[in-house]
Image: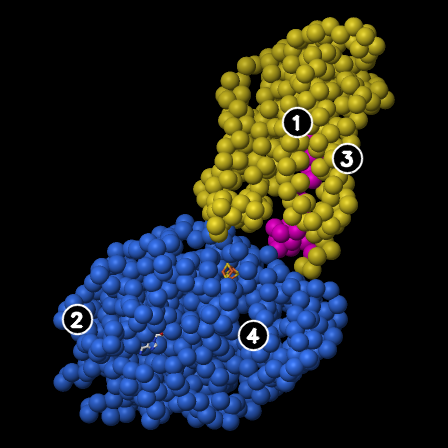
Amino acid sequence: MLSNPFSAPRARHGRAPDVFRHGAWVSMREHRETDEVDFAIVGTGAGGGTLAALLAEQGFSVVAFDAGPYFRPLEDFASDESEQNKLYWTDRRVVDGANPIQMGGKNSGKAVGGSTVHYAMVSLRFRPEHFSARTSLGYGADWPISWQEMWHYYDLAEKQINISGPLTYPWGPKRPRYPYRAHELNGAGKLLAKGCEAIGINWTETPLATLSAPLSGPEGKSPPCAYRGFCRFGCTTNAKRSALTVWIPRALAAGAEIRDLAMVGRIETGPSGRATGVHYHREGEWHFQRAKNVVVAGYAIETPRLLLNSADQRYPDGLANSSGLVGKNLMTQSNQAVWGRMDEPVRWYKGPPSLAITEHWNYDDNKDFHGGYIWLGQGPLPNEWASIQTGARGLWGQKLRDAMLDYNYMIGVKMVGEMLPNEANRVTLSDDLDQYGLKVAKITYAWGDNDKALIAHALEQMGRSIEAIGAKGIFLQEDDTNHLGGTARMGSDRRTSVVDADCRSWDIPNLWICDGSVFPTVGGVNPALTTQTIALRTADRIGQLAAAGEL
Amino acid sequence: MATTRERLKASFLLGFRGEAPVARGGYETAPIPSKTEIVTAARRLNRAAGTIAASVLVDSAMEHYRGDFRNKAMWTPIVTSALSIGVSVHGHVDGRHGAHPLRDTVYVAAGLTGLVGTAFHIYNVTKKVGGFSWQNLFYSAPIGAPAAISLSGLMGFLGERVRDNKPGTRPMVAGLPAGRVVAALTGASLLGTTAEAGLLHFRGAFHNPAMLLPVTMPPAAAALLVYAAVGPAGVARPASRGWLAATAAMGIAGVALHAYGVSRNMGGWRNWRQNLFAGPPLPAPPSFTGLALAGLAALALLVDDKDD
Ligand SMILES: Cc1cc2nc3c(=O)[nH]c(=O)nc-3n(C[C@H](O)[C@H](O)[C@H](O)COP(=O)(O)OP(=O)(O)OC[C@H]3O[C@@H](n4cnc5c(N)ncnc54)[C@H](O)[C@@H]3O)c2cc1C
Ligand code: SF4
């Protein structure tokens, strides 16, 4: 009988689940709450999970907290879209603004491994100019890190995550060969390719964080992808390279402790103004863990919420907020799609959904708006497809039934587009309380004119591409968004950013933020590889600062 | 004594039979069981042809079953390789001198089938989106696979040519010393097969170091064979023979390694119905065994061929 990952923590009593073997455990070092650990990390996703492994491997004592459960993919994941809603952060949140963001499965996970447990594995590098968007392209904000440095850490990230990708990537400066070969294109991928060729733009196989061959890594043995297409609902095979299968096992092996079902509610600061530890809720009680350093890695909503909820007498506006920017400049990415019906069956549900990509529009500057976008092949599973039919097309009853019968013939392409930072788009605290008694986040969002122009351009191009290959009954899905960023941006000036290039907060030298919220701009590609890359760099920098006695 | 050129020309006219053929009837009506080196070498080549054909039979049956036999032509390699196995067994038990017309016909047919199959697989690659790209080389109908049946045909055909030499004569193929011809062609075939294994193991990112074996051992064997083909005759070459024997063994071990590869897929062998197709092909590696056997036959011929 399987234990319920939600009923009680699994990482306890000196052991944690071995995600690679049924029912097995790996040993886990544990720390007392009275021990002042080197790092308390809040969140174990793309940012926190990566950092937990890399800091522990450098010999730091690490405790990483996650509000979500510790899943065993081989046992807990079902091939069932509804069941797998358990992966998402569906706690109460308030959304408003002209274009309220739909929260939950689209954009936030709550599990050890964070959103990478259900992410679509698309692993892209920013366009180099996107790191200096303000000076090179005239919009948004510059990153405090050069693209050359990021390129170096991207190399390391791709290698350690073991990305499967094309032999030559058609855009951007040279990069090393991906560790594993690209996957076979499914019907949807081939049609994306045909569509791109029909309108004269380049395409390639998408670099994906799922294995195209078996892997025996230091973290464990994984089989290659089985092409069943449940990626966004939790990969049952472990072919997916999520934080849960890449970084967390490494963190444990290096002596980090993971605390699952542990919601951090407040960061404590001491008389010196430095962070002293975290208050967290686990097994029905509040606890306090002492720490020399606190890293917040809860993603772009929960990170500012925790900083704001940690306001105290000394920091009445929340921690690390002397710039007033905590929670501001929230960005999502536009995720509009065009759909159509082919005459021949496509069976788009086979394999990872986004096997082919065009990044052409990130590299073409002859557009009358700022920013760029990509588009990817799609393979929504039936529930999601039904909700697109009811949502984007308003179909119900017999019409909906008829539309669903075309499932095997459908194709679609979906964009991931850059949205520009805007201080009015933000996370604040609502007066509503969640199950832990904490103020919930209020998320305010409106698209700007530039965002709308970019979306219109993408919809037009995507429509052209599938029309050119004979898709019929084309319709648009016009109001979807996905990944998040901003709300604790990094920069080189403490007045206009929350953290520096090392993800260290300007205000509190032992408070760090290392996740998607530090992005000053979101670029026109999916963010998770960049988040992990930043964590790699941050870990290196922390090592250097420690060696120099500057922690 | 005819010049080499004349002999070559004659051999083409005579259906590639090398030296003027011996009267067939005599052998057929009054078989003289002969244990001459010529027949031994020919039978070795039959075994080589049969081994490769067996590899092709199982491989193409599995792959084309997976492809639902969508195109009737997908039965061709199955029929051809089965026939090639049949005549190879026949050749193996046949202790007589002289080429056999049925064996010859089947081997030539196998050789041609492979060529047509290769053309077809290339066409299949080029018509896919992306054309001649890594994606299609990796995942479309494998270009090298049909060539394997050609190699079976080639080895069998060479066996028949060798066998067609008179007992006690110096074995020739197409007017050239048989050992050298077989060594050179086997060397080339090994390189071709290496290319196929290399492509697919590259697709698998050489994730297991054992995947390097079929891209290192066979090329070395090929080099040894080419050296033997042009080098001095009448030499024992124990190291080369040892290396070829090891290459033959590698082909068999490859089945076990591929079986391990199958187990590395989700569900392992419990899920054999899917993983036999998702994992590395079990029947493929023995192609190397077949070619190594042919190489051993060539070396044996060269040892006996002292008349250089
Ligand atoms: C359906 C979906 C598909 C995606 N596909 C892709 C893709 O293909 N490519 C790509 O690049 N990106 C993709 N993303 C985005 C990507 O997953 C995220 O950008 C990335 O995981 C963010 O990393 P993070 O570390 O900032 O946060 P997360 O990975 O979300 O991790 C945050 C963790 O912190 C925990 N947490 C938060 N607050 C607290 C607290 N107070 N106490 C304790 N724990 C807390 C949460 O439970 C969560 O586990 C996808 C996202 C979704 C939802
Ligand atoms: S398609 Fe591949 S990556 Fe996606 S869930 Fe299945 S095995 Fe995992």
Whether residue A342 sits left or right of residue B269 in the image: it is right
Chain identifier, blue in the render: A
What's under tag 1, amino acid-wise? Answer: Gly
Query: Residue A261 versus residue B147: which sits nearer the camera?
Result: A261
Q: Residues within 10 Å of mark 2 (few under 14, many from 20)?
A: some
- Do the residues at discs 2 and 4 belong to one chain? yes
Q: Which chain is yellow?
A: B
- Determine if marks 4 and 1 fall on one subunit: no
Assess whether residue B266 is covered by the magenta stretch: no
Checking the image for residue A33, the label placed there is: 2
Chain ID at mark 4: A
Q: Is residue A145 above or below residue B1?
A: below
Q: Which residue is mark 4?
A: A384
- The residue that disc 3 covers is B112
Circles 1 and 2: CB atoms closer than 8 Å: no
Q: Ligand 1 appears in which quadrant?
A: bottom left
The residue carrying pointer 1 sits among few (fewer than 14), some (14 to 19) or many (20 or more) residues within 10 Å by Cα, namely many
Q: Residue at x 54, y 67 (%)?
A: A172
Image depth: mark 2 or mark 3 in front: 2
Label 1 and label 2: CA atoms lie apart by: 71 Å
- Name which residue type carries label 3: Leu
Q: Residue at x 52, y 81 (%)?
A: A481
Residue depth check, mark 3 versus mark 4: number of the one nearer the observer: 4
Q: Which mark is residue B50?
A: 1
Q: Mark 3 — on which chain does it sit?
A: B
Relative image position of residue B307 (x, y in whole percent)? 66, 10
Label 2 residue SS: loop
Q: Disc 2 versus disc 4: distance between alpha carbons?
A: 43 Å
